[in-house]
Image: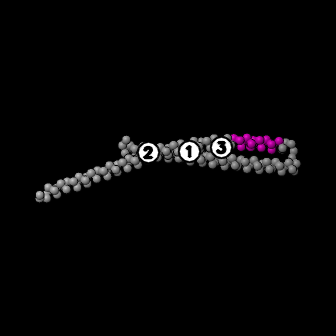
Amino acid sequence: MSRTQLEMLADLARDARDQAGIALAQERQGEQQTTAQLHSLNRYRAEYAERLQLAMREGIDPATMYNYQQFLASLDAALERARQTLAAQQKRVEKRQQHWQQEQRKLSSYDTLASRRLVEEHRRLERREQKTNDDLVTSRLARQRNETPQ
């Protein structure tokens, strides 16, 4: 595989990793929003339950009590849906995290290959330079021997 092909693969892997990172960030943002909504629903439910307790202490008619209970039941259902949504969102985040890690490993593999290739290229150049230097020294010594009267 040529150096340019390896660079092209590394660039593609880098782009794929970056796209996976963007998708992961979006899923995490969705998770934060879902968590915030769940907390808001929990607070609202607690406040509403507190209002019901206060109304019961002060005396409440059966119709109003029924309305409070129905509304609390609908809040409980909404809370359950929000918990399920959060669990699904967390699974999506985990899946995106794994995908990002996979893309990062792929990029690291290409980078490692490129580094090895570069080291190999440097060694070849050094050997070539050494051979050239050796040849120069050998030819200089041969000339000196030929020029020296015997």
Instruction: Tell me the SS state at disc 3.
Output: helix
Q: Amino acid at mark 3?
A: Leu
Q: Is residue 135 above or below residue 81?
A: below
Q: Residue 81 at x, y = what percent?
A: 69, 41
- Between the residue at mark 2 and the residue at mark 1, the CA separation in whole angstroms equals 20 Å
Q: Residues within 10 Å of mark 2 (few under 14, many from 20)?
A: many
To which residue does mark 3 refer? 86
The image quadrant where one finds the N terminus is top left
Q: Earlier in the sequence, mark 1 or mark 3?
A: 3
Name the residue type under label 2: Tyr
Mark 1 → mark 3, Cα distance in angstroms = 16 Å
Q: Secondary structure at mark 1?
A: helix
Work out whether mark 2 precedes mark 1 in sequence or the reverse, and give the earlier one. 1
Residue assigned mark 2: 110
* Prevalent SS, magenta region: helix
- Seen at 84% across and 44% down, the residue is 64
The residue that disc 1 covers is 97
Label 2, secondary structure: give it. Answer: helix
Return the mark for residue 3: none
- Please name which of the two marks, 1 or 3, marks the residue nearer to the observer: 1
Residue 42, horizontal then vertical, whole percent: 72, 48
Q: Is residue 132 left or right of residue 3?
A: left
| Residue sitting at the far bottom | 148
Task: Check if mark 3's residue and mark 2's residue have beta carbons within 8 Å.
Answer: no
Residue density around tag 1, few if under 14, some if 14–19, many if 20 or more, within 10 Å:
some
Where does the magenta region start and end?
66-82
Q: Where residue 111 sits: x, y (%)?
A: 43, 47
Q: Is residue 105 left or right of residue 32?
A: left
Inspect this view and state whether residue 10 appears: no
Mark 3 residue crowding within 10 angstroms, few (<14) / some (14–19) / many (20+): many
